[in-house]
Amino acid sequence: MRSLDEFAGEKLKALDQAQLRRAPVVTARAGIWVERDGRRLLSFSCNDYLNLSQHPDVIAAALDATARYGVGAGASRLVTGNHPLYTGLEARLARLKGSEAACVFGSGYLANTGIIPALVGADDLILVDELSHACIHAGAKLSGAAIQLYRHADMVHAEQLLGAHRARKKRALIATDGVFSMDGDLAPLDALAQLAQRFDAWLLADDAHGLGVVGGGRGSSFANGNAGVEVPLQMGTLSKAVGAYGGYLCASRTVVELMQTRARTYIYSTGLPPGVIAAATAALNVIEREPAYAAEPLRKARLFARALNLPEAQSAIVPVIVGDTDAALQASELLRDEGFLVVAIRPPTVPADTARLRFAFTAQHPDADIERLAAIVRMRVLRN
Ligand SMILES: Cc1ncc(COP(=O)(O)O)c(C=O)c1O
């Protein structure tokens, strides 16, 4: 169809002009190394924080389950895709998070776009931290609830919005990243839990980047100790530190049962491949067994941040904000020429004028490479 291609072509041209066009680059990963365009680079752009995607136990579990049960799940979980391996994975997740129950979705994106509309709708209010991940925003839009964005981590603003809008709405949900994916900071979950209590709202924290890395591996609601913050909806993904794939919600048994019968992305999407479920379970075993190993990505991130005089890292993610999109792309190229892969993150993934290099640290990055990287960033990107 000519009009269709014209539409797509014009959109792409506008994105090209603004330096905002994105396209996937073929990348082969092997541990902390990647191969791109024929070059071997040390990657600081993978969310495999504990390198568990390459762990022998995790790979063995995936191979064994695949050999026994085949590759695909064959149907959605409510039909015949509810493999027995899910029981072990969900029990593991609930134990790690201290919740009554857990349910696993096809991905983190599918989790948020299923959970949120199953809980709130047209009569309700949803408060969202403005820097939350795209799938929280998508879930909020899909729900049809009235959306109020509060300024990033600004509890005064969140309180004002609840004061102004809560009384007119039936139910209220507060949704935030636990660790912000492009900034690496932690949400003020304690203060949010108190606000939720005061205004009779439910708190959802997306721990995609917290699980396995902060709070002794238990995630951002445990960042201040084992007692944890009261977060009734602990959502996250199995695709980052867990090194596998899938999303989850840890919550009360009643809420989990509601998801199993109402969350559309749980119901109308095929179950995870058995090999992936087995791999995720094996990875969670490693995380539970080896807390000292789980502490490594944060230690590495802190080493890097200290070398650049940046605020102390709170997670495995350290952003270096460059501002201009062009400058961020050039900085990324400069690092590539030095043997590092650090992908530039541009709007709309981050707000306008905050294009950045996003550094993600993993347990197996050698300290010496981190120090060399920091020296190059200091001298050639930040120029100080
Ligand atoms: C905060 C956050 N939530 C959710 C997701 C989506 O998870 P998944 O990749 O499993 O779909 C991501 C990243 O992709 C994320 O950074």
Image (spheres, rainbow, N blue to C red):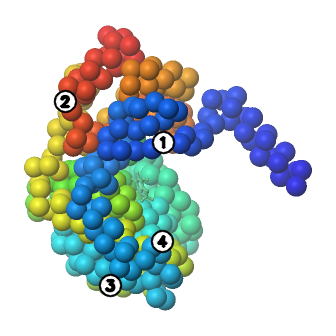
The number of numbered discs placed on residues in the rendered structure image is 4
Helix, strand or loop for disc 4: helix
The spot of residue 373 in percent (x, y) is 30, 23
Q: Residue 84, labelled with which disc?
A: 3
Name the residue: 52% across, 26% down. 329
Residue 75 located left or right of residue 64: right
Residue positioned 18% across, 72% down in the render: 95
Give amino acid for label 1: Thr
Please provide percent x and percent y for residue 189.
26, 55
Camera-side residue of 38 and 336: 38
Sequence-earlier tag: 4 or 1? 1
Judging from the image, what secondary structure is the residue with disc 2 in?
Answer: helix
Could you say which is closer to the camera, residue 141 or residue 344? 344
Q: CA distance from mark 2 to mark 4?
A: 40 Å
Tell me, yes or no, if residue 193 can be seen here.
no
| Cα–Cα span, label 2 and label 3 | 41 Å
